[in-house]
Amino acid sequence: MKRIPDDVRKDIPIVGRYIYLDNTATGLTPKPVLEAMNEYYLDYRSNIHRGLHKLSQEASLAYEESHSKVAKLLNVKENEIVLTYGTTHGINLVALGLKLGKGDKIVLTELEHHSNLIPWIRLAKTKGVKLEFVNTSKEGLIDLEDLAEKADGAKLITTHHVSNVLGTIQPVREISKIARETDAIFLLDAAQSVGHMEVAAKELGVDILAFSGHKGLLGPTGIGALYIKEDIQEEIEPVILGGGTVKDSWAEKLEYALEEFPWKFEAGTPNIAGAIGLGAAVDYILDIGLDRIEKYEKELTEFTLSKLDDLGITWYGPREKAAVISFNVPGYDPHEVAAILDMHKIAVRSGHHCAASLMKKLRVNGTVRASYHCYNTKEEIGAMIEVLGELV
């Protein structure tokens, strides 16, 4: 079992030359994950499936093992996992594949990342589906009573697990209970929770869950996964077809037969190296321990909030939150603050964070966002606080 943060920092060279506090945008990839990907490229580089030669067999096995590792991470069945190119890709596959039409109701929040907002707005414009937005508190928590009222007759309820701006952790089990009572499909955007805390999809009661490999899991970019519960898989049509998705076809009859789940959703040559890296990233995170990661990140978060309070700097969201902290320094534009921190080799994010509707709700033009993983330290946060103190 790796010690945090020391053992993890040894696997990530970037932390030796830069204070990296931008983990909500993307995590840093440790050497063992990169080595697993390099091994594929150097030792058994081949396309997957249908190849009879040994290289193809090895690549296919490694690719398929990634499905089983993701299933283990989410505590679901292997045949409930589709590999995607990331959270955005996964949510769009669902939005385009669900059999939704004019008047069908989708319930969501104004706090969503654009990846879980724009696809539904498009359906409202192109198919006439009806969007209803649930009330939320100033800390970003969903009003469950309002949700229960608006969920009546809904085809789909969707929200984030952890806000990429406020760090708010939504009461997913309570939301899923409302979804079950109203026979709505429940889709969870878990981009900011997977890899930071235990996310057991079945115990949470979700029907569909999307996440990316490059964020909390510290894996490569261009890879992610969808969990789709077995008993609703037929309700989603694949929207990208081609090689790997078809059992047989008859051109003269204009007919084709699709493969079984999940392969009918994984058209073309996939990101094989990325999938292998995703599997290695799952192994790496589980070796550290999700409970240890969550506990450590809570310590870093509370440390930061206390220091910001001492400086009189406004931060947003609840005090009990994930390791995502948005704040503003009086008299400074968020981009100015980020640029000054960058001069001190401290990386944070600034702007609306792909959540423009939330910024309007907060009545700000943007925020500075610091976000952590298990390789960050109080010393690094202290360096950021020192610069902010000088600005104040």
Image (cartoon, helix red, strand yellow):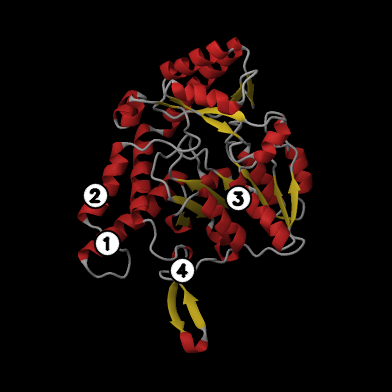
Q: Which residue is mark 2?
A: 39
Residue 389: numbered disc:
none
Q: Quadrant of residue 165?
A: top right
Disc nearer the start of the sequence (3/2): 2
Which labelled disc corresponds to residue 46?
1
Mark 2 neighbour class, 10 Å CA radius: few under 14, some 14 to 19, many 20 or more: few
Which of the 4 image quadrants contains residue 63? bottom left
Q: Amino acid at mark 3?
A: Leu
The Cα–Cα distance between marks 4 and 1, rounded to whole angstroms, is 23 Å
Q: Out of 7 and 71, give the one closest to the viewer.
A: 7
Question: Where does label 4 land, which residue?
Answer: 260
- Element type at marker 1? loop
Left or right relative to 217: residue 33: left
Q: Using the image, tell me which numbered label, if any, was put on residue 187.
A: 3
Q: Which residue is depicted at the point 79% across and 45% down?
A: 149
Question: Image point 33% across, 44% down: which residue?
Answer: 280
